Amino acid sequence: MPRPQKCRRVCALPQTRGFRPVDKSCARQTPVIMALDEFETIRLIDREGLNQEECAAQMQVARTTVQSIYLRARQKLAQALVDGHPLLIEGGEVIVCERSAACRASGCRCRCHAADANR
């Protein structure tokens, strides 16, 4: 029996919950669902410039976990872009940082303590 998945800490929920191609053909396409933790790894690594180890500390998971989340997220982005699927960002086992407003404004480099994330 597999271990239960550990909640991942995210700094804030995305401002935009989805994207779709501009042409009308996307109405027939099955959307690609990106989980909130996958979105967070893309944001932290690609947007904020953190390495995988720093991202893991921020999300309070192992670096190998971040590596697999990041791989899944990149595959989903590629599928949406290359195949013209709509992309929805939703779901997943996450805890939103209590200081998310301050994190978002400062480019999110806060290091919330585990106790803060579990309140």
Image (spheres, helix red, strand yellow):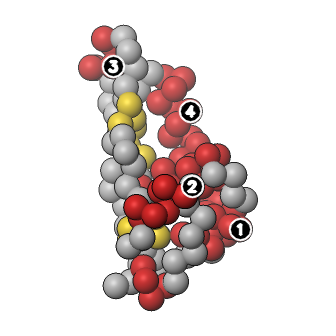
Quadrant that contains the C terminus: bottom left
Q: Could you say where residue 23 lies in the image, as x and y percent from the top left? A: 36, 11
Q: What residue is shown at x 62% (from left), y 69% (from top)? A: 56
Say which quarter of the image contains residue 82.
Answer: top right
Q: CA distance from mark 3 to mark 2?
A: 33 Å
Q: CA distance from mark 3 to mark 1?
A: 36 Å
Residue 74 can be seen, yes or no:
yes
Residue 1 can be seen, yes or no:
no
Q: CA distance from mark 4 to mark 1?
A: 24 Å
Q: Residues within 10 Å of mark 2 (few under 14, many from 20)?
A: few
Residue 37 lies left or right of residue 118; in this view the side is right
Residue 116 lies left or right of residue 53; in this view the side is left
Q: Which mark is residue 71?
A: none
Q: Residues within 10 Å of mark 1 (few under 14, many from 20)?
A: some
Q: What residue is shown at x 60% (from left), y 64% (from top)? A: 109
Q: Which residue is mark 3?
A: 26
Q: Which residue is mark 1?
A: 53
Kind of residue at badge 1? Glu
Front one among 104 and 49 = 104
Q: Could you say where residue 97 lies in the image, as x and y percent from the top left? A: 42, 70
Tell me which label, 3 or 1, sits earlier in the chain.
Answer: 3
Q: Which residue is mark 4?
A: 78
**Discs 3, 2 touching: Cβ within 8 Å:** no
Tell me which label, 4 or 1, sits earlier in the chain.
Answer: 1
Query: Relative to 97, is 1 above or below?
Result: below
Q: Could you say where residue 50 lies in the image, as x and y percent from the top left? A: 69, 58
Looking at the image, is mark 4 or mark 2 nearer the viewer? 2
Front one among 53 and 30 = 53
| Residue at the bottom extreme, as displayed | 115
Check disc 1 and report its element: helix, strand or loop: helix
Kind of residue at badge 2? Gly
Q: Which residue is mark 2?
A: 107
